[in-house]
Image (spheres, grey):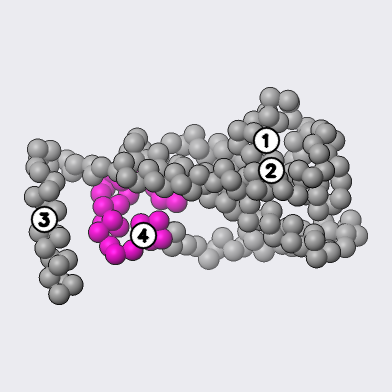
Amino acid sequence: MFGSDFVRTGAFDRLLLRPRSAALQLVGHDFRISRFGRFFQAAIILAIATSSLHFVWTPQAVLLALWTIAGGIAFFGALFVLQAVMAFWTVESLEAVNALTYGGVYAGQFPIALYARWFRTFLIFIVPLACVAYYPVLAILGRSDPLGAPDWFLPVAPWRGSSSSACRSWRGASASRSTPRPGANENVDTKLTLRPIRQSVDIVDT
């Protein structure tokens, strides 16, 4: 979402002064066209895999695949938002969240049945990666879960992943406090420093 540099250098304060949502501004801050290469790579692999399996895409399978992608976007988006929000309290973003994002991508490449029971529980209930990477694939392929999950749960599993999208964690922005610059007087009244800015905004509006 954004790095801790925004909070440490005070760049986040400039976003708050603009007449647009800070979240909206940050979404397009680090937009890289090169990342579309990952999408096309995944699409090619999916086409080759389904062709090798002689899989026939039905309308239900297409809708479930789109539903799964939406759940995955919400899930990983929530993790990035959570990492960004932590910077409001720690000033430095926690690299431990990368273990859930990059590590989660790696863990999702294998069936969760291969993992130990405690790790399966972690991937299903605590960080529900399996709900957006494992169970939907079983439903699309028409397979039953070898671990015993009910069949009705497989197609609705992406909802479990997206519901944990604590995109509401963005409310943590209310806890943001400007970090003082080196040598700055910390006793300066913030109301006095913001008053000229508000007056200038009123002049522009008129």
Q: Residue type at mark 3?
A: Arg
Query: Which one is earlier in the sequence, the residue at label 1 or at label 4?
Result: 4
Q: Is residue 157 left or right of residue 12?
A: right
Q: Secondary structure at mark 2?
A: helix
Query: Which one is earlier in the sequence, the residue at label 4 or at label 2?
Result: 4
Query: Which one is earlier in the sequence, the residue at label 3 or at label 2?
Result: 2
Q: Residue type at mark 2?
A: Cys
Residue 22: in magenta span: yes
Q: Position of residue 134 (x, y in %)?
A: 74, 44
Query: Which one is earlier in the sequence, the residue at label 3 or at label 4?
Result: 4
Above or below residue 108? Residue 26 is below
Nearest the camera: 61 or 119? 61
Dominant secondary structure of the magenta stretch?
helix
Q: CA distance from mark 4 to mark 2?
A: 31 Å
Q: CA distance from mark 2 to mark 1?
A: 6 Å
Dot 3 corresponds to which residue?
195
Dot 4 corresponds to which residue?
21
Nearest the camera: 184 or 204? 204
Is the Cβ of the residue at disc 2 closer than 8 Å to that at disc 1?
yes
Please rate how many residues cluster around mark 2, counting C-alpha atoms within 10 Å: few if below 14, some from 14 to 19, many from 20: many
Instruction: Read off the magenta span.
Output: 1-26
Dot 2 corresponds to which residue?
131
